[in-house]
Image (cartoon, rainbow, N blue to C red):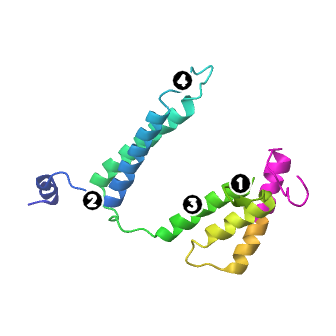
Amino acid sequence: MSLNKIEKAQGIRVRSTQDLAAGVFMMLLAGLALVLSSDLPIGTLRQLGPGMLPKSFAVICAGLGALLVISSLRFDGEQLSGWSWRGVIFVLGAACVFGLCIRGFEFGPIRVPALGLALAGPLVILISGLAADDFRPKELVIFAVVMSTACALLFKYALSLPIPLAPWLLGI
């Protein structure tokens, strides 16, 4: 019996559970985006409405997810394995710390002053750098200083965005 006949006899089977899971997740995410943006008007191609971008991205995401699901049935790939929660916790935690510290916040007795981009930028890079397995403190500090300087030059001065730079020191 030839290989093609054997494969036809087996029917449809999942060859890459990782691609299948990623495709299903993308389609669910696209469905959620479509539901949440359902009340936004799309507009026309001449005058785009606020719903055009999220709905377009949701349709593209759903299409790519469907392609992943189809490829998981056709081509061999990796099997779904466990993930490292360390990266998820540190990267999402760093984003939350950045959002809370850039302009400061008060929550009951807890008060954090506005740190601005000068301190919140390196802080987010240092915290998210802890997610890596090959963590090197010296390199991470250098990277944090260089990236924060580049972000300050880009966002504050080149793009003139109203991001506080160092309100605790310079008042800007």
| Mark before the other along the chain sequence, 3 or 4 | 4
Give the magenta range: 147-172
Which mark is in front, 1 or 2?
1
Q: Up-down: is 55 above or below 141?
A: above
In primary-sequence order, the first of circles 1 and 2 is: 2
Mark sitting earlier along the chain (2/4)? 2
Indicate the amino acid at tag 4.
Answer: Pro
Q: Marks 4 and 1: which is nearer the front?
A: 1
Residue at x-position 19% and y-position 51%? 12
- Apparent side of residue 129 relative to residue 34 in the rendered image (left or right): right
Tell me the quadrant of the picture where the N terminus can be found.
bottom left
Gap in angstroms between the C-alphas marked 4 and 1: 34 Å
Labels 4 and 1 touching (C-beta < 8 A): no
Classify 10 Å Cα crowding around label 4: few (below 14), some (14-19), many (20 and above).
Answer: few
The crowd level at tag 1 (other Cα within 10 Å; few <14, some 14-19, many 20+) is some
Q: Which residue is under mark 3? A: 92
Q: Upstream in the sequence, badge 1 or badge 3?
A: 3
Residue corresponding to mark 4: 41
Pointer 2 local density, CA inside 10 Å: few below 14, some 14–19, many at least 20: some
Where is residue 10 drawn, in percent x and y?
13, 56
Q: Is residue 34 left or right of residue 153?
A: left
Viewer-nearest of discs 3 and 2 = 3
Label 2 sits on residue: 15
The mark closer to the camera, 1 or 3, is 1
Relative to the observer, which residue lies in front, 157 or 17?
157
Q: Which residue is mark 1?
A: 105
